[in-house]
Image: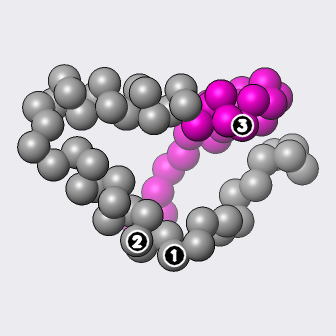
Amino acid sequence: MSEKLRTDPQIEDPDDFYARLIDLHQGLSCDESNSLNCKLILLMANHIGDREVLFEVLDVVRNYRPQK
């Protein structure tokens, strides 16, 4: 992993953010929820802007295996 990608916690009050993210999807169909996720991903990717970091994010997410 490069030194550019930050994986340590950076979000102030992550539980509140997660709750708002879940609330954002309330009442949406599966297609609407998927569309919202795409918009969210593209907007955040644009904010990051660094191609190297974005490609690393894709690699990390593709290979992510949650610990049990």
What residue is pinned by disc 3? 48
The 10 Å Cα crowd at callout 3, few under 14, some 14 to 19, many 20 or more, is few
Give the percent coordinates (x, y) of residue 19: 32, 65
Give the residue at x 89% y 50%. 3
Which of the two labelled residues, at mark 3 and mark 1, occupies the earlier sequence position? 1
Q: Mark on residue 16?
A: 2
* SS at circle 2: helix
Please tell me which residue lies in front, 56 or 41: 41
Q: Residue at (53%, 26%) from the top-left corner?
A: 42
| Left or right of 55 on screen, residue 30 | left
Give whichever of 7, 46 is nearer the camera: 46
> Horizontally, is 10 left or right of 44 in the view?
right
Residue 51 part of the magenta segment = yes
Q: Secondary structure at mark 1?
A: loop
Please identify the quadrant where the C terminus is shown. bottom left
Region in magenta: 44-68
The spot of residue 23 in percent (x, y) is 24, 56
Local packing at callout 2 (Cα closer than 10 Å; few below 14, some 14-19, many 20+) is: few
Residue type pointed to by label 1: Asp
Magenta span: chief secondary structure: helix
Name which residue type carries label 2.
Asp
Q: Name above or below for residue 2 compared with residue 7.
A: above
Which residue in the protein does label 1 denote? Answer: 13
Residue 49: give its label.
none
Is 56 on the left-hand or right-hand side of 61? right
Outermost residue to the right: 3
Q: Are marks 2 and 1 in contact (CB under 8 Å)?
A: yes
